[in-house]
Amino acid sequence: MVENRIRIAAFALASLLAAAPALVGAASAPLPKSTQDDLKKLKLDPSILSDLDKELTVPQSWIDGAKKEKRLRIFSTFDPPQAEVVLRAFKERYPYIAIEYNRASHEDRAIRTLVAFKNKKSVTDVLTGLGGSFFMYREIGAMEDLRNIPNIKNNPPGTVDHEGFWVGMHMRYWCMAYNTRQIKKQDVPRKWEDFLANPIWRNGNLALGNRPQLWALQLWKARGEKWTKDFLSKLFTDVKPQLRREGVNAILELLAAGEFYGSIPSAEYRTYQKTLDGAPVSYTCPEPVPVAVSEMAILKGSPNINSARLFVNWFLSKEGQISQYVADYAPPVHKGLQRKELLPFADQIVGKEDAFRDPALELEVQPKLLEFWDQLWLKGGGRRRSGGPG
Amino acid sequence: MNESLRISLWQHGIFLLVLFLVLAPLSFLILGSFSTARLPGDFSLHTMGLVNYISVYADASTLDLFANTIIYVGGSAALGIVLAVALAWLVERTNMPGKIFLYAGVPTTLAMPGMLQAMAWVLLFSPRIGFVNTWMKDIFGPGAPVIDVYTLEGMICLEGVRLVPTAFLMLVPLMRSMDPSLEEAAAVSGARPASTLRKVTLKLLAPALVAVMIYQAMTALEVFEIPGILGLPAGIYVFSTKIYAIVRTATFMPVYGQANALAMVYVLIAVATTVLYTRLISRAERYTIVTGKGYRPRQFDLGRWRIPAFIAALFFLFISIVLPFVVFLYASFLPYLQAPSAAAFKVMTLKNYRLLAEYGEVGSALRNTFMMVVTTATATVALSFVVSLVVVRSKFWARKLLDQLAFVPHAIPGIVMGIAFFWLFLKLDFLPLYGTIWAISIGFTISFLSYGTRSMNAALLQIHKELEEAAYVSGAPPWRTMWRVFVPLMMPTFVGVWIWVVLHAVRIAGMPLILAEGPGNQVLAILIWNMWDEGYVPAVAAIGTLLMISLLLLTVLVRIIGFRRHAMQMVGG
């Protein structure tokens, strides 16, 4: 009898615990329709967003301010149709903010915005993907301090600038893509040294983009200065890769067309998008896996500062992170969403030794790496990175 | 206020406006070349020096830059003139069949934007994945010869082909109205046809050919799109692309002063070329070959070469219009870039066209482009008309200077004008123009002013003064004279200039690339440039296909208007 009662009580407790997330969910505000669609598309249980209301709680003054501003300008790397998908849920939540989105290349995003800022012109509020240009923004104090954004606490350590000038918006695994018609399985590199050993990569069959800070920086951290310099020297002199001036997306398009067999660096999300188009490309990560985050920042003196804060906070919430994954398959940075089903080519990444590009690495090692890289690049016939003559 | 004072005020107002719009940006361009500050916003008279000139001209690579530019400009102008002379000679001086196709087709090639043609050539002749090179490899094996478009030769070939239609249009009337007596004399003296062609025909045409070639060289010097798309990926720079590369960097803050310092040479070369051109034109009467006699030059019998000549001429049209269009049409249906094959045709999709409808930036770029071309064309017509009115119809003390001022921008490349206006709009920040579509409109209006005023000057000279004198005697105020006399008579010229400006403004990327600041003033040419640069090739092909169709239709419209105007003039006597 007593046993039965205990069983019943245990069953009731277990049922209650199992239903708890759903009950909390039921008690919270209804999800925007686009978020519900996103969850369905990804086959995720709505309970994953159980603490969303808490994540989206912000000072009332931000909301009041945003209602007055009514406008938000964003420069980012999402293609416009993808941006539509990213922003659907935000627009439903904050219908009083009209968004002007602009997809821009690195030059347009980082350099033109900075030139305009230096000339006291404001061309955007939110800016993403500053990459190697961040130090110039720091120099002139062009960024707002984002440490008051509630959801930065969801980011893993090292994915927020120590002075709060940028926050990581999604993960990037900068490895390599290859053409599946030209590379057989046995030739797919497992570690970085394989590029030096396997002759298939020689004589222009490998393409290098001029963005060493995306991947070589992490190798420097994991293997040290000497190893990295030796590796890069041999890569340039022995393998003789094609030195491409195009951006990483254009290089991926050329890879699919067969211009070369493999390309470095390539990101998992873009390669995955190409495979969905039926392109003969795939992705692999030699060890150690270079990991980074893309940065998001708010320009200092932004006339739409409250709308910008609302947006950054929303983007770092689980809802924003899921929206951006649905849009372009970029792995979320949110600690609660680091799972295999939200990581394209997970089998090529998870379980391998990785090397993370943290802010300290960017400040200390990046200038040395760029100086060394530029010598190799120019010697190899590549185009100068800076704008000076030559 | 009496009438003459009011007219004088108007004339001074127009003069000052043109003086400001032409000289203010150029002044900033010159001053900026001495600025030691990296950015225009940091410029002050206290930060002046020669550092930009030293760093630019002490650099060994600048010599390569000079050499590349000279080879590129000289080579493409020479190729363009050879092809144009051959085509003009075939249609005017031989019995080649099917001439109507060339009369109609060659000027139509003007409609093809250079940027899209260069992109089509990349798809065809990229060394590893170009469709032509892929076919060659399939047919002849891995050792097949490779055509590499990313070379100076590739740039020269394409620019040479692009220069043909303008030269053709200039040469056809000359060939048509040549006095055949000297050629006939040579023939009677027993000279062979080829020798007559070389020693008589071409020698008679020599001054005109030199003038056309100089004009073509100026055009090649100014063009940015061809060396930008074919030269930049291979690190082959000419002046226009080097200036662009200096101000558009990926990692470091650009040094605008260096771009300005480099632009100074560009300006000097262009101005010197203009002076030479003007002098040659002024001496042209020494070589008069058209007389008052009515005659028809003798037709050269091609014999068994008639059909091969026709095929060769059609081949020009094929590579200029048909091939780029077909390549773009094909690529626009691809999910990703790939050479033509049965497999490629199986996976064709309308995705890229659907994407255009969803791509918010396409909509805003179209709106911006529409506003930009309409305002630019209208402003160019209006400003050119009033300037020409002062130059041709008044006794204003500075009318010659005004005419020269209006001509100066023709000698300055778009990319340099872009930088000049960039400085102007940043420094004169009380004018809320920086980053707006109006900034591009103003820049283009000044650039096209020389063409507009040349056309208006010629048209106004044809209207006899007695018409306005009759209106004046009848008591009509000047505005009514303008409205009732000039506007109706000038309407064909207005429409012609308006459409010409639209055709050019819609496809030039150089100046908008410098003045673009974001979605607010991004035009179609910039969108295409950026999307190409970032690898969205099939999407670019979809936009390019639609743009080509629109421009071809517009060109046909121009031709129809041209024919009507010709018909009107014929009727008018």
Image (cartoon, rainbow, N blue to C red):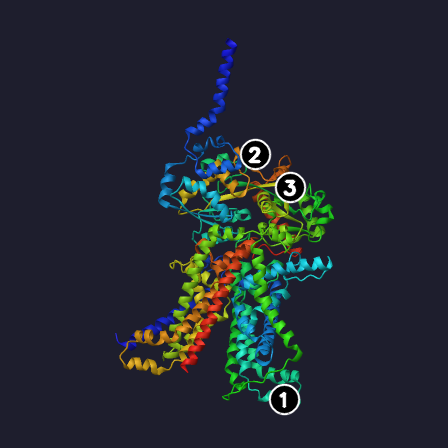
Disc 3 versus disc 2: nearer the observer: 2
Residue A285 got which mark? 3
Q: Is residue B570 above or below residue B501?
A: below
What percent of the width, then of the height, locates residue B365? Answer: 46, 56
Residue A339 got which mark? 2
Amino acid at dot 2: Arg
Q: CA distance from mark 3 to mark 2?
A: 18 Å
Q: Looking at this view, is B446 or B61 the one in front?
A: B446
Amino acid at dot 1: Ala
Disc 3 versus disc 1: nearer the observer: 1
Q: Secondary structure at mark 3?
A: loop
Amino acid at dot 3: Cys
Question: Quadrant of the image for the C terminus of chain A?
Answer: bottom right
Q: Secondary structure at mark 2?
A: loop
What percent of the width, then of the height, locates residue A87? Answer: 46, 43
Q: Residues within 10 Å of mark 2 (few under 14, many from 20)?
A: few
The reply to whether the C-beta atoms of the residues labelled 2 and 1 are less than 8 Å apart is no
The reply to whether the C-beta atoms of the residues labelled 3 and 1 are less than 8 Å apart is no
Residue B219: quadrant of the picture: bottom right
Q: Is residue A202 above or below residue B124?
A: above
Number of callouts in the render? 3
Q: CA distance from mark 2 to mark 1?
A: 89 Å
Residue B228: quadrant of the picture: bottom right
Dot 1 corresponds to which residue?
B186
The reply to the same-chain question for discs 2 and 1 is: no
What percent of the width, then of the height, locates residue B63? Answer: 62, 66
Q: Residues within 10 Å of mark 3 (few under 14, many from 20)?
A: many
Q: Secondary structure at mark 1?
A: helix
| Residue drawn at (50%, 56%) of the image | B527
Disc 2 versus disc 1: nearer the observer: 1
